[in-house]
Amino acid sequence: MQSLTVSLIQTHTYWHDPEANRALFDELFEQVPRVAQLVVLPEMFSTGFTMDSSRVAEAMDGATVSWMRERAQTLGKVLCGSVVICESGQYFNRFIWTTPDGELRGYDKRHLFRMASEHEHYAAGRERCLLELAGWRICPAICYDLRFPVWLRNRGDYDVLLVVANWPAARQQAWQTLLRARAIENQAYCIGVNIVGSDPNGLHYHGGTAVYAHDGEVLSESGNTPSVVTQVLPWQSLQTAREQFPVDLDADAFTLSVPGYGDKGYE
């Protein structure tokens, strides 16, 4: 199987201004090389990390998702990132995945950041989502999900863990450490896309968008400035590592209980 080329966009965002943010990303798309197959935007890229869900939420056929679908087709690449979505009277922090041929998928953030009262303004997701691109299996996650290894455990069903975030500078070391840990324990590439700048709540963001290999090696890492980073993920090195060091064969079976959804067993 061929390598996968990903472009990661790290930038500031305009608070509660989807139109300005869409225009900003349109400019940044010019830095994405033709060879990129996947373009990743941060968490809540159209609004900033806001608890004012009723004010900023859009429908799945709203302006931002429609823009994503149009840009995926124009760029000829998969485009993804999280957006505040209203559906059936509930609000979700939803990871949106759009493809050039019109496919639309979504993952709702499971672990809502209670220290910012996110759980009071959004509904939690109940299921993981697995995506596929050029034969690569990708598991999306959103920010605080990164702290929960059971939820993100590789059950032999993904090759890339993809985390979009608004992760504050005060916990930057945790961001870097957890990304590396998830890569190592799951024998998968781990990608984290963060923002830079500050928001009206007084939070500061120092970026640190990065790609980690299955052994924790840093393949690329952004500093504290806006950037578009493109990284090739080699397939053969991942497969060789899994064959030579098959830790998955000794993994524990477990049952994951999701409130309101029931138990699900994994071997």
Image (cartoon, rainbow, N blue to C red):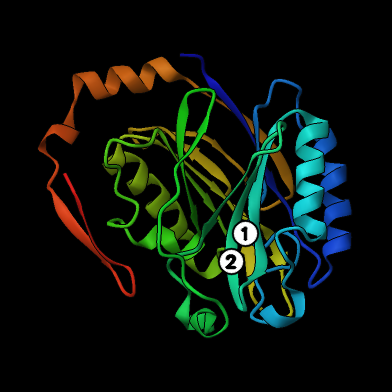
Residue 60, image x and y in percent?
70, 59
Callout 1–callout 2 Cβ contact below 8 Å = yes
Q: Earlier in the sequence, mark 1 or mark 2?
A: 1
In the depicted view, which residue is nearer to us: 197 or 262?
262
Q: Is residue 244 left or right of residue 14?
A: left
**Residue at image point 58% right, 66% down:** 93
Quadrant of the image containing the C terminus: top left
Mark 2 neighbour class, 10 Å CA radius: few under 14, some 14 to 19, many 20 or more: many
Q: In the rendered picture of this protein, how many numbered marks are placed on residues?
A: 2
Q: Which residue: 63% across, 64% down? A: 205
Rendered location of residue 121, percent (x, y)? 57, 82
Q: Given this view, does label 1 or label 2 mark the residue nearer the observer?
A: 2
Read off the residue under disc 2. 93
Residue 67 visible? The answer is yes
- Up-down: is 112 above or below 209? below
Mark 1 and mark 2: Cα distance apart in space:
8 Å
Q: Is residue 201 visible?
A: no
Q: Which mark is residue 43?
A: 1
Q: Residue 62: x and y, percent?
A: 79, 61
* 52 relative position to 234: left or right: right
**Eyeballing the image, is 72 above or below 265?**
above
x%, y% of residue 187? 31, 35
Q: Residue at point 34% right, 74% down?
A: 260
What secondary structure is found at the residue carrying circle 1? loop
**Label 2: which secondary element:** strand
